[in-house]
Image (cartoon, rainbow, N blue to C red):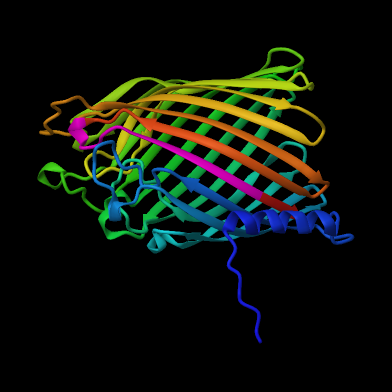
Amino acid sequence: MAMPRIRLHPSAQLLILAFGATLAGPARAIPGSALDLAARIGWAHDDNLLRIPDGFPAFDNQRSDSWTTLEFGAVYDKDIARQRLLAVAKLSKVKFDHFRQLDYDGRDLQAIWYWQLGNRFSGQLGGSYTQTLAPYTDFPSDERNLRKQRHGFFEGAWKLHPRWEARTALVRDRFDYDLAAQSFNDRTEDVVELEGRYLAPSGSAVGLVLRRIEGSYPNRRPFAPGGLSDDFTQNELKARIDWKAGGSTTIQGLLGYARRSQPSFGGRTSGANGRITALNDPGGKLAWRASLWRDFAPIESRIVSYTLNKGVSLGATWRASSKIQVDADGVYERRDYNARANLNAAGGLDDTLRSASLKASWAVRRKLTLSAAWIHQSRSGSPALGIGNFKANTVALNASAQF
């Protein structure tokens, strides 16, 4: 008589896999190879998966859902004379318990050539492709919406003098959305950047950056008056700072002035723009980080295509032991929306996003790690954009191993 088949909950599968990997001992790298392999299994639960606003009816009368993730990855890292080649490939399969129409295959592919010619010329050339489920924070739907991003870049630096360097960068990002109702968010962004930089003997650096960004939206947004597109140009003049403030403190920033021209939003927007980050890591048990920013950012909305975000984040890392680490982070961000031409902005065109996270990881063996995380997110909402306030909590368990 055949034994009955027992179906285990994903969280139980996760624990069994982790326990089995522990008994098997540490994974071994391929001798003499530049190739490393890794695998991850994860389980997560969200009490408001599709970010339904408070008081609004839920899709299929269901707000929460759980999902499992199976991921396999490979890293190739090889030095060839003065050159270095790095390639990363991650393939994943994500399955949901209730909203099964959201099941998808994830992709994360990257390749970078760190090149050097002589003693004066160096840089990077590379690209990446990612495929993942787009967030539902600002787009109410229970349909699968895969977002594909293609990223290509070239960066070159010319050392004019031991203390002076000239740098240029070219970047192209292309975003495509599978869901027809989100096709108006398809876009291409091209960036051209020039920089002159001073390199201090202490390891600090300061540079002056000229940057131009051109954005192209091939599809019109439903509420665009007169068929106006969301195409834009943005010109920036900023200072790039990398200051070694002390033995354990680093301050990094890209700060200055930006002018954005987007006809469908009534002309130009300009002002202070940038981000500054402080990092402190004395090398002991505690390290911290903090950031401030005022920057333009895209938004996946039917009505507007970008926001002016002002935010702050704080975080800390506690290395409880050689094998246990705890990370805590909090983010507050206010998003201001420039009204489209002829858009009725009654009710205000701004909202706030708040998030907090706590993650603990345990290096069980040299190449086996278990982790658990809790994430909270909330939004105040904007009546003019038809989005309300919500709260959501996520818990996640992961086991990852290297081979």
Specify the quadrant that holds the N terminus.
bottom right
Range shown magenta:
383-398
Q: Residue at x 32, y 47 (%)?
A: 216
Q: Nearer the viewer, residue 380 or 179?
A: 380
118 sits to left or right of 107: right
Task: Name which quarter of the figure residue 252 lies in.
Answer: top right
- Residue 392 x %, y %: 41, 37
Picture mark count: 0
Residue sticking out furthest to the right: 31
Residue sticking out furthest to the front: 1
Magenta-colored stretch includes residue 393? yes
Magenta-colored stretch includes residue 366? no
- Residue 280 x %, y %: 68, 18
Task: Name which quarter of the figure residue 212 lies in.
Answer: top left
- Residue 396 x %, y %: 57, 45
Residue 110 visible from this viewpoint: no
35 sits to left or right of 193: right
When the figure is inspected, residue 23 is found, relative to residue 227, above or below; the finding is below
Q: Residue at x 37, y 26 (%)?
A: 309
219 sits to left or right of 245: left
- Residue 132 x %, y %: 47, 54
Task: Name which quarter of the figure residue 39 lies in.
Answer: bottom right
Specify the quadrant that holds the C terminus.
bottom right
Q: Residue at x 48, y 26 (%)?
A: 331
When the figure is inspected, residue 192 is found, relative to residue 93, above or below; the finding is above
Q: Nearer the viewer, residue 290 or 374?
A: 374
Residue sticking out furthest to the top: 246
Q: Nearer the viewer, residue 302 or 295?
A: 302
